[in-house]
Structure formats: structure tokens, C-alpha cells
Amino acid sequence: MQNKICVITGANSGIGFYTALALAKKGAKIVMVCRNDQKAEAAKKDIIDQTQNDKIEIFLADFASIAETKSVAKEVAAKYPVIDVLINNAGFIAKKYREITIDGLEKTFAVNHMGYFVFTHGLLDAVKAAPQGRIINVSSEAHKFVRKVDLTNLQLTRGYSSLKAYGISKLCNIWFTQELARRLEGSGITVNAVHPGAVSTNFGLDSVPIFETLLKLGRRFLLTAEQGAQTSIFLATNPEVRHITGEYFSKSQIKAVSRDARDDAKAKKLWQLSLDIAGLI
Ligand SMILES: NC(=O)c1ccc[n+]([C@@H]2O[C@H](COP(=O)([O-])OP(=O)(O)OC[C@H]3O[C@@H](n4cnc5c(N)ncnc54)[C@H](OP(=O)(O)O)[C@@H]3O)[C@@H](O)[C@H]2O)c1
């Protein structure tokens, strides 16, 4: 990984932080895309202290905004016209109530799906320019919480719950992974999705009370963030997976996805809807 360019979103904490740390240890140049300057600077310092690798750069963006996501992708691509590894990792679960973004989208869908979709679009030429680009989308087993998802109600204007919104967004990560992999066939780029495990991070601590309580009670049974980063690190670095694309991995192995997630027609439709929402051609 010496001097390879690895772009990681949400790299200031949890799984993203330990992914960045491991790749920095291997000598990669790390581009951290975070929303909070102070948290990002603290994480950068920690990575440099632990690895003595100072090739770490921060870009700031809130993935809840399509304009900010496009703009940060443009900045990163201008500075790094060749990107070896892109890890879409930043994720969010809402509190009880439905939140709407500046673009009028349900926030979980906006951050967790549109964030990945728009950011990846902005960096795609740079990933294509790498000898063997890899894209990794951090999804979740939570994609199995939802069934028969209605693509006309992705914003959950009907029947909202934050767990449902989260499940849909993580299902979208898998549909996006599969459709992008199909579109990139023959390019040499691989695109895979990851379930990191049930991991003790900041995730969900400020969300639905029941989820928060379960997380606190079950903390000692959860993986550490370092353990949770292992599948992302494996997909970013392991030569054995250089030809595997369009798959869903957990514990560094291919795993089955839900029945909904195998619906290619929905994956295609989501792609078109996402292009329209983002105003991309
Ligand atoms: N923890 C688990 O058990 C688990 C299980 C399955 C999947 N996952 C997935 O793993 C990924 C990483 O989560 P984690 O567990 O490591 O949680 P985490 O420690 O809370 O990290 C989430 C990261 O995403 C960033 N983020 C959230 N909203 C953002 C936004 N609007 N714009 C930019 N960045 C934003 C956070 O930034 P701030 O620090 O500024 O908030 C943080 O850096 C997520 O995609 C999550 O869905 C986690």
C-alpha cells in the first residue's frame, strides 16, 4: 500500500478511524473526508503519532448536502487525479423523528445513500485512473430489517421509523454497489459492500432510545472498532480479492444478501432515481 491514495469518509471515528489507521500503517497516503474540523484534526494527529506516517490530509464536508458532497469530491479529485481506494464509510442513524435535509430528502437516505452515490460519482474518473481501483461501501446486516421496499416511498413520507430508514439506506448501499459493479465491468475496478459486524462505536448512541439502550447493555458483546474495520481493510489491501466485484462481505468473506437486495431491477431504478435527485446526467 506504500504511497497508494486511499480516500475514507467518516475517518475521524469508529470503523473509519481504524481503517485509516491500518492503511496509514501500511504506508498509504490517507485522505480523510470528515464533517467536523476539530474531530478530524484530533484523529489525524492520533494517526500520525501512532504510525509516523504524516501523509494524511483532511477535507471537510457534510454529506447531508448534495452541493457540499459534489464540491468536496471536486476538490479531492482536483488534488488527487489518481485514487487507488475509495471507502464510503460515513454513516448516520436518526433519532425518533424524520429529519429533512437542505435538499428536501429524508436525512438517513441523504447521508447514507446519496452521500456515497454523489461522492463516488465525483471521484470515479480518479479511481478509473488507478491501476486497480477499489471502491468499498460500508453497508450493514440492517439491510435485512426491511422487505419489499417501495421505491416510490424512499423518503418514507409514509410509515417512517428511524430503524426502517436506516435499513433502507443500507439496502441502497448494496444496490448501489451491485449496479456500479455492473457498470464498471471490464474496467478493472472492483466495488464491494461490507457489513463490519456489530461494533462498539459512537454509532447510534444519540439515536432511537431502544437502539441506544441495547447498544449500552450489549457493549461488552460487540466488536471493537478496530475489529470492525477488518473487512474494509481486507478489501482495500488483499491481492486475493482484486478480481472480485459486486459482492457483500462480512468477516472478510462473501455473504448472502437479502432477497430484496438481489432485485437487479430495483438496483437499476435506484440508480436512475439517484441521478435525478442529484441532478447528474
Ligand atoms: N457500529 C456498528 O455496529 C455498525 C454496524 C453495521 C454498519 N455500520 C456502518 O459503519 C459505518 C461507520 O460507522 P461507525 O460505527 O464507525 O460509527 P461512528 O463512529 O459514529 O462513525 C460515523 C462517521 O460518519 C460521520 N458522519 C455521520 N454523519 C455525517 C455527515 N452528515 N457528513 C459527514 N460525515 C458524517 C461521523 O462524523 P462525526 O464524528 O462528525 O459525527 C463519523 O466520522 C457507518 O456507515 C455505519 O452505518 C456500523
Image (spheres, rainbow, N blue to C red):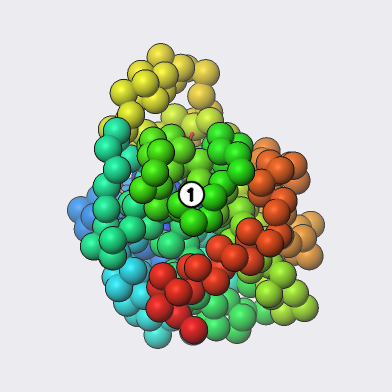
Q: Out of 50 and 205, give the one closest to the viewer.
A: 205
The yes-or-no answer for disc 1 within 8 Å of ligand 1 is: yes
- Residue at the limit of the structure toward the left, as seen here: 38
Crowd tier of the residue under label 1, counting other residues whose Cα lies within 10 Å: few below 14, some 14–19, many 20 or above:
many
Residue 97: give x, y in percent of width and height: 27, 38
Above/below status of 246 relative to 271: above
Residue 256: give x, y in percent of width and height: 74, 42
**The residue under label 1 is which amino acid type?**
Ser
Q: Out of 61 and 82, give the one closest to the viewer.
A: 61
Q: Which residue is mark 1?
A: 169
Above/below status of 114 relative to 256: below
Q: Which residue is found at the position 39% from the left and 44% from the top?
A: 158
Q: Which residue is found at the position 23% from the left and 62% from the top?
A: 102
8 relative to 267 in the view: left or right = left
Q: Out of 185 and 43, give the one closest to the viewer.
A: 185
Quadrant housing residue 60: bottom left
Above/below status of 130 relative to 22: below
Label 1 element class: helix
Quadrant housing residue 70: bottom left
58 relative to 17 in the view: left or right = left
Q: Which part of the image, by quadrant, shows the N terminus?
A: bottom right
Q: Is residue 49 visible?
A: no
Residue 159: give x, y in percent of width and height: 41, 38
Residue 152: give x, y in percent of width and height: 49, 56
Q: Is residue 250 visible?
A: yes
Q: Which residue is found at the position 54% from the left and 77% from the top?
A: 124
